[in-house]
Image (cartoon, grey):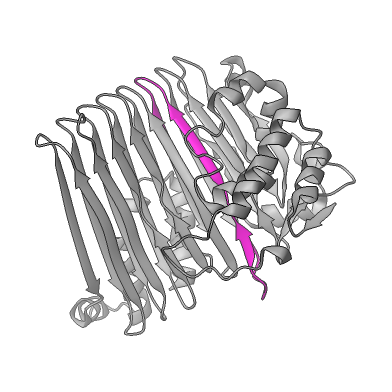
């Protein structure tokens, strides 16, 4: 089944295909109306998309059941994912979900996590099997009238993960979802909802890829995360979308008392990225961290950053942004720190570092920092630099080629990001950076 273009009839068709409850169908239709009425973003890169050309839903009609055994997945798909390293990475995880085009095709989790009553499944399964739990959190911190692309996601969302970590639960290994766009003009609109209940922790890893086509594809995801009291969530992602993909994502976390949220966010591929992971530090003594890298090459605009909203007392946030521009690419940091009147004794640190590799490339830093009480502070530091000939000469005098010397300097520049990743993903990042230099 393939749905191209969007109107009310096609939104209903997606809902009917999924055999959804009335409340979900009504949510989709309300979202579609919002999508029609909301303007395109008034900031950031130019988004040159024809919404009538986008494939909003695509599935294999022969077998749409979610599999837990790779032998039950179509062999060409398995071979493709195996080549990308997806099957190998599963050995290091507590559970994995894979979305191919519009549907989750594979899901599996260690038995020990099932015994702990951890829920890790697709959002559609969660809506059927845990409707009250989903309704409690769904569309609460990222709403379907917030921006044009959150509205679009609400209308046509398909796939994505639902995770619930019960109170007093520790996971020794990460959970992962992998998203693959494999068709030209394809749109992928996963919806991810994560709840880490009190006194628990989770590390969630996300990977994204797509082949290169001449036509543009669209990735417009929504991620909502709830971090309970004394809990911790880390969300690590490395997206390597093809250079024809518009990557327009809304990610937000709500953090309760003494909770910690960490976004580890890598942006290497895509034609245009607009992504600003956010922490709403609602609880007293809560903390938020966002460490990002962006690599912008020829024809790429990476418009990324972070948002930290301090509402509770004694809250802390830390933003580290690393960007690299090369071959005429444009890497922009766009961030916001807001410390509310009642968020006394709060601290925020922002550090933006840019490495520009040639005369054609550019980088901008566009921060908004606002502190509304006299007992809190915001520190912002930004640096822009080039690879110096002196550093290259020093390394080359030790017998290292110019290309290898440049590679070493860039990898050193990104060390803060790499050290936050699991070992196998740090190795993958190294390979991606080398291929993109």
Question: Can you say whether 264 is above or below 195 in the image?
Answer: below
Does residue 15 show up magenta in the picture? no
Q: Residue furthest left?
A: 374
Question: Quadrant location of the C terminus?
Answer: bottom left
Q: Position of residue 393 (x, y in %)?
A: 22, 82
Give whichever of 30, 18 is nearer the camera: 30
Give whichever of 337, 101 is nearer the camera: 337
Does residue 218 show up magenta in the picture? yes
Question: Can you say whether 310 is above or below 149 in the image?
Answer: above
Q: Quadrant of residue 386?
A: bottom left
Q: Position of residue 254 (x, y in %)?
A: 40, 32
* Drawn side of residue 414 relative to residue 154, left or right: left
Q: Is residue 60 visible?
A: yes
Give whichever of 304, 26 is nearer the camera: 26
Q: Position of residue 299 (x, y in %)?
A: 49, 77
Question: Can you say whether 379 is above or below 45 in the image?
Answer: above
Q: Position of residue 205 (x, y in %)?
A: 51, 42
Q: Report the residue at 84% width, 49% height from top.
A: 60
Give whichever of 179, 194 is nearer the camera: 194
Q: Residue furthest bottom?
A: 359
- Write down the region rendered in magenta: 210-233
Q: Is residue 85 visible?
A: no
Total number of numbered labels?
0
Q: Report the residue at 43% width, 46% height from top.
A: 423
Q: Residue furthest right?
A: 62
């Amino acid at each position: 089944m393939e749905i191209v273009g969007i109107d009310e009839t096609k939104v209903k068709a997606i809902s009917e295909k999924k055999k959804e409850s009335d409340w979900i169908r009504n949510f989709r239709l309300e979202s579609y109306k919002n999508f029609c009425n909301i303007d395109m973003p008034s900031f950031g890169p130019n988004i040159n998309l024809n919404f009538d050309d986008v494939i909003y839903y695509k599935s294999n009609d022969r077998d749409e059941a979610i599999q837990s055994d790779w032998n039950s997945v179509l062999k060409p798909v398995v071979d493709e994912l195996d080549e990308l390293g997806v099957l190998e990475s599963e050995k290091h995880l507590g559970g994995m979900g894979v979305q191919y085009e519009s549907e989750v095709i594979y899901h599996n989790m260690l038995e020990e996590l099932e015994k702990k009553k951890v829920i890790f499944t697709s959002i559609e399964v969660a809506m059927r099997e845990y409707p009250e739990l989903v309704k409690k959190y769904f569309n609460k911190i990222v709403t379907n009238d917030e921006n044009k692309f959150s509205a679009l996601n609400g209308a046509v969302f398909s796939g994505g993960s639902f995770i619930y970590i019960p109170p007093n639960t520790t996971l020794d290994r990460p959970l992962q979802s992998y998203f693959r766009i494999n068709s030209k003009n394809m749109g992928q609109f996963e919806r991810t909802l994560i709840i880490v209940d009190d006194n628990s922790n989770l590390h969630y890893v996300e990977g994204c890829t797509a082949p290169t086509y001449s036509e543009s594809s669209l990735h417009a995801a929504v991620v909502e995360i709830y971090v309970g009291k004394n809990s911790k969530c880390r969300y690590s992602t490395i997206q390597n979308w093809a250079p024809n993909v518009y990557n327009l994502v809304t990610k937000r976390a709500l953090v309760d008392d003494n909770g910690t949220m960490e976004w580890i966010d890598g942006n290497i591929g895509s034609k245009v990225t607009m992504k600003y992971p956010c922490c709403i530090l609602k609880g007293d003594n809560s903390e938020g961290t966002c460490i990002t890298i962006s690599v912008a090459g020829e024809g790429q605009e990476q418009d990324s950053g972070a948002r930290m909203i301090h509402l509770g007392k004694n809250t802390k946030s830390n933003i580290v942004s690393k960007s690299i521009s090369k071959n005429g690419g444009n890497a922009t940091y766009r961030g916001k720190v807001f410390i509310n009147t009642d968020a006394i004794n709060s601290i925020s640190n922002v550090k933006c570092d840019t490495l520009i590799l040639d005369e054609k490339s550019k980088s901008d830093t566009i921060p908004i920092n606002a502190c509304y009480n006299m007992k809190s502070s915001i520190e912002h530091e930004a640096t822009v630099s080039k690879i110096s000939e002196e550093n290259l000469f020093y390394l080359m005098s030790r017998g290292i080629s110019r290309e290898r010397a440049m590679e070493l300097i860039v990898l050193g520049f990104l060390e803060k990001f790499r050290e936050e990743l699991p070992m196998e993903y740090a190795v993958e990042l190294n390979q991606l950076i080398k291929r993109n230099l």
